């Protein structure tokens, strides 16, 4: 394909205008089709009976005929958008904004673009991230894999004023290495299966959050997510010192080069972090450990669908969000918050 994907027609085949032109019925039909398939048969979320209901057109609801059930349900019952206040059309527009802003969109920007409350945009965005996280394909990777880890959050503040002879000055970038024991320090580990012919870059991405980039965690991740015998490329960090036994392990010394003369590199892992950092710097600003996996899962998904037509991305996102209820974002603004951070164990 010539040219950049984002400049091609399929990158703009599902836009705000597309949604605007759709009637409320059409949007509703799209939700129903993606949730239950094209057969026109609905499954009752209460009792699981299929197609034994009647449709209340004025309310856009179905009522179950099953004895002892008799529940009314809508296209969003039992999904991320159960009890939604936004119209389905607005939700769909939110999804278009989410997919087309390839480095992510902030709740404040979405609120101002859609004309909805900040809290509404915030919750919608987090529900989309939750859907992505729940549906991440974590089947083991094979053939050629690039791995790397990056330090995220947990840094000391810069000094406010310049102090003579101090190790760091107010203008300095504080190195992560200087702050090893910070309580909020986490490592994001990325594993990417790469096209061995080199033509199309990364094929699939798995991310996890761990406490340290060391041999113990690297091994646990590798055993779970990388098939034995695969070729694994990393930098020369001691974290990967035990990989020789299980994989064809090749390393690149990053203090000298990004890629060896033989083409050994972990550039796809590096490029993941480059994009993640841009999203954090330009848009998220701060990632706390509690919601770190949410954000990095978003980056992984964006990377994996980077050349997928927008219509397919939006339908995919809608499909993921219609599978299950939200675990963490119902009642967030009423004070119900996730208790634990999500880390790889
Ligand atoms: Zn039922």
Image (cartoon, rainbow, N blue to C red):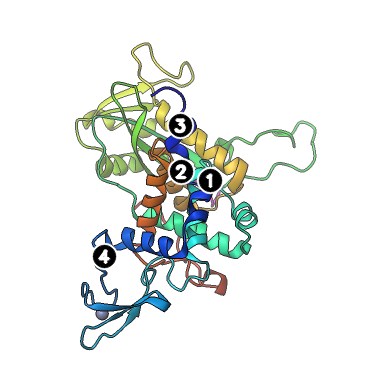
Residue 299 numbered tag: 2
In the figure, 338 relative to 261: above or below? below
The residue labelled by disc 4 is 40
Q: Is residue 157 visible?
A: yes
Please say if the residues under marks 2 and 1 sit with CB atoms less than 8 Å apart: yes
Residue neighbourhood size for the residue with mark 1, other residues' Cα within 10 Å, grouped as few (<14), some (14–19), many (≥20): many
Camera-nearest label, 1 or 4: 4
The residue closer to the viewer here, 71 or 331, is 71
Quadrant in which the N terminus appears: top left
Q: Main secondary structure of the magenta part?
A: loop
Which sits earlier in the primary sequence, circle 3 or circle 4?
3
Q: CA distance from mark 3 to mark 2?
A: 22 Å
Q: Is residue 286 left or right of residue 23?
A: right
Vertical order, 181 against 71 (above or below): above
Q: Cβ(mark 4) to ligand 1 < 8 Å? A: no
Q: How many marks?
A: 4
Whether tag 1 and tag 4 are in contact, CB under 8 A, the answer is no
- The answer to whether residue 286 is left or right of residue 7 is right
Q: Percent x, y for residue 45? A: 29, 73
Position in image of residue 14 (x %, y %)? 45, 46
- Report the residue at 47% width, 38% height from top: 150
Q: Residues within 10 Å of mark 4 (few under 14, many from 20)?
A: few
Determine whether the residue tagged by mark 1 lies in a helix, strand or loop. Answer: loop
Residue found at the far bottom of this picture:
68
Disc 2 and disc 4 in contact, CB within 8 angstroms = no
Eye-nearest disc, 1 or 3:
3
Name the image quarter holding residue 312: top left
> Alpha-carbon distance for marks 1 and 3?
20 Å
**What residue is shown with label 3?**
8
Q: Which mark is residue 104?
A: 1
């Amino acid at each position: 394909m010539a040219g950049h994907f984002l400049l091609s027609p399929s990158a703009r085949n599902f836009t705000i205008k597309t949604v605007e032109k759709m009637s409320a019925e059409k949007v509703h039909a799209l939700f129903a089709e993606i949730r239950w398939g094209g057969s026109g048969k609905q499954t009752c979320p209460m009792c699981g009976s299929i197609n034994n209901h009647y449709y209340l057109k004025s309310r856009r609801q179905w009522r179950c005929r099953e004895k002892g059930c008799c529940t009314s349900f809508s296209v969003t019952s039992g999904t991320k958008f159960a009890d939604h206040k936004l119209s389905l059309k607005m939700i769909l527009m939110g999804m278009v904004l989410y997919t087309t802003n390839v480095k992510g969109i902030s709740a404040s920007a979405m609120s101002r673009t859609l004309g909805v409350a900040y809290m509404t945009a915030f919750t919608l965005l987090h529900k989309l991230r939750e859907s992505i996280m729940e549906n991440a394909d974590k089947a083991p990777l094979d053939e050629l894999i690039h791995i790397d880890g990056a330090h995220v959050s947990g840094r000391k503040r810069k000094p406010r004023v310049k102090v003579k002879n101090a190790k760091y000055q107010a203008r300095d970038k504080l190195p992560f290495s200087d702050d090893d024991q910070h309580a909020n320090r986490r490592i994001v580990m990325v594993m990417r299966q790469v096209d061995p012919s080199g033509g199309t870059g990364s094929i699939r991405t798995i991310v996890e959050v761990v406490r340290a980039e060391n041999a113990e965690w690297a091994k646990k991740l590798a055993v779970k997510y990388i098939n034995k015998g695969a070729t694994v490329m990393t930098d020369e960090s001691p974290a990967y010192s035990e990989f020789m036994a299980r994989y064809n392990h090749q390393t690149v010394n990053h203090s000298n080069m990004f890629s060896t003369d033989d083409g050994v590199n972990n550039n796809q892992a590096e490029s993941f972090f480059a994009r993640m950092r841009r999203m954090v710097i330009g848009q998220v600003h701060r990632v706390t450990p509690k919601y770190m996996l949410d954000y990095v899962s978003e980056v992984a998904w964006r990377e994996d669908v980077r050349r997928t037509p927008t219509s397919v991305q939006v339908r995919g996102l809608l499909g993921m969000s219609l599978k299950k209820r939200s675990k963490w974002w119902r009642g967030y603004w009423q004070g119900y918050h996730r208790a634990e951070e999500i880390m790889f164990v």
